[in-house]
Image (spheres, helix red, strand yellow):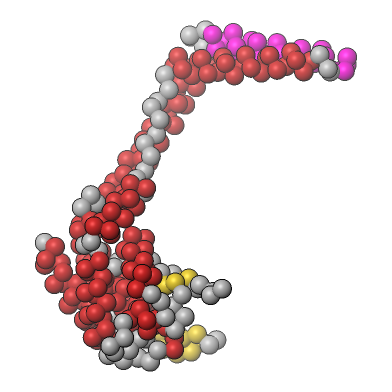
C-alpha cells in the first residue's frame, strides 16, 4: 500500500490561496514542461485540486502523496507560477469550491449561548437536584452500618433544610445564584459577540470578500522581503545572518525561499485579481 505523506505549514499569512499555492508548489521545485504540475509532483489532478481547496479553506498548504517533489529539478518557476495561479483562480470560482466554502463557513460559525435562566428555572432545578439527592440518600441509608445512620441523618436533614430555603422566593442563596447566572451569561454573550465579529471577518458571506482579504494580506506580507539576505548554517539548519529577518514570520521566510521572480509574479497576479474583485 502506497504511503501517503501529509505535511502542512503556515502560508503567506493564512492566504493559502492562489499566490501562496503557486509559491509553495514552486518551492518544491517542479519544471515547466508539457507534463502537468500534478504529475511532476507525483500526484493526481484530483489530489492537486484537493490541496488547493484545503489551502484556501483552512489557511495551510496541504500536500498529499507528493513523493516526487524533491526529485524534480528547478525550471522556469515564473512560468509555472502563472500556470498554478491561473489554475487556482479558476478553481476557487467554481460552484464546487463555493459550496465547500459555505459549508466551512457554517461549520465554523460560533454557537450562541442558551438564554439566561430565570429565577424560577434556577429554583426548580435546584429543588429537583435536592429531591434526587434526598431520595437516593434514603435508599442508601437502609444498607448503612448502624454507627453511620445518625451521621447520615444529619446530612439528610441538611439537604432538606437547603430545599426548604430554596422553596422560599426570598432566599438569599437563591438570589446569589441568580446573580451568578447573570454574570456567567453576560460573559458568555460577550465572548460570543467577539467570536461572531471575528467569524464575520474570517468567513464573509461572499467568498470573493475572503479572496480579497487574503490577497491583500499576501501583498502586505511580501512587500518588504529582502531577497538579498544572507544565510548561515547553524547545527545543520540555515538561519538568517540578520537577527531581524530571523524573527520574521514563517510566511515572510517562505516568500524569501520562493525567490524574487516568483513572488514578483505572484504579487502582480494578486494586484490584477484584486482589481477584478473590486
Residue placed farthest to the front in the image? 1
Q: Main secondary structure of the magenta part?
A: helix
Where 182 sits versus 64, above or below?
A: above
Q: Residue at x 18, y 75 (%)?
A: 269
Range of magenta residues? 145-167
Q: Position of residue 137 (x, y in %)?
A: 72, 16
Residue 183 placement: quadrant: top left
The residue lying toward the viewer, choosing from 59 and 157, is 59
Where 255 sits versus 166, above or below?
A: below
Q: Position of residue 222 (x, y in %)?
A: 26, 75
Counting the numbered discs, the total is 0
In which quadrant will I find the C terminus?
Answer: bottom left
Residue placed farthest to the right in the image? 146
Q: Is residue 122 left or right of residue 91?
A: right
Residue 24 placement: quadrant: bottom left
Q: Position of residue 136 (x, y in %)?
A: 70, 17
Where 112 sits versus 168, above or below?
A: below
In which quadrant will I find the N terminus?
Answer: bottom right
Q: Residue at x 50, y 85 (%)?
A: 237
Q: Position of residue 38 (x, y in %)?
A: 35, 78
Q: Is residue 161 magenta?
A: yes
Residue 249 visible to an observer of this rendering: no
Q: Residue at x 20, y 57 (%)?
A: 209
Residue 235 placement: quadrant: bottom right
Q: Is residue 113 magenta?
A: no
Residue 137 visible to an observer of this rendering: yes
Amino acid at each position: 500500500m502506497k504511503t501517503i505523506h501529509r505535511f502542512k505549514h503556515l502560508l503567506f499569512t493564512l492566504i493559502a490561496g492562489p499566490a501562496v499555492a503557486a509559491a509553495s508548489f514552486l518551492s518544491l521545485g517542479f519544471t515547466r514542461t508539457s507534463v502537468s504540475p500534478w504529475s511532476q509532483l507525483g500526484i493526481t489532478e484530483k489530489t492537486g485540486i484537493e490541496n488547493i481547496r484545503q489551502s484556501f479553506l483552512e489557511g495551510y498548504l496541504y500536500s498529499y502523496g507528493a513523493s516526487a517533489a524533491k526529485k524534480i529539478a528547478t525550471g522556469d518557476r515564473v512560468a509555472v507560477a502563472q500556470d498554478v495561479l491561473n489554475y487556482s483562480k479558476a478553481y476557487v470560482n467554481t460552484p464546487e469550491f463555493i459550496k465547500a466554502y459555505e459549508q466551512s463557513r457554517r461549520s465554523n460559525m460560533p454557537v450562541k449561548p442558551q438564554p439566561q435562566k430565570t429565577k424560577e428555572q434556577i429554583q426548580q432545578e435546584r429543588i429537583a437536584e435536592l429531591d434526587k439527592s434526598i431520595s437516593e440518600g434514603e435508599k442508601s441509608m437502609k444498607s448503612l452500618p448502624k454507627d453511620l445512620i445518625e451521621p447520615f441523618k444529619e446530612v439528610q436533614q441538611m439537604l432538606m433544610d437547603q430545599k426548604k430555603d430554596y422553596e422560599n422566593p426570598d432566599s438569599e442563596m437563591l438570589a446569589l445564584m441568580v446573580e451568578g447566572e447573570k454574570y456567567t451569561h453576560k460573559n458568555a454573550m460577550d465572548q460570543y459577540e467577539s467570536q461572531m465579529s471575528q467569524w464575520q471577518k474570517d468567513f464573509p458571506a461572499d467568498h470573493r470578500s475572503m479572496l480579497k482579504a487574503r490577497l491583500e494580506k499576501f501583498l502586505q506580507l511580501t512587500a518588504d522581503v529582502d531577497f538579498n539576505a544572507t544565510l548561515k548554517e547553524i547545527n545543520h539548519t540555515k538561519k538568517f545572518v540578520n537577527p531581524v529577518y530571523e524573527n520574521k514570520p514563517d510566511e515572510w521566510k517562505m516568500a524569501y525561499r520562493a525567490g524574487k521572480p516568483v513572488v514578483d509574479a505572484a504579487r502582480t497576479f494578486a494586484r490584477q485579481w484584486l482589481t477584478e474583485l473590486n
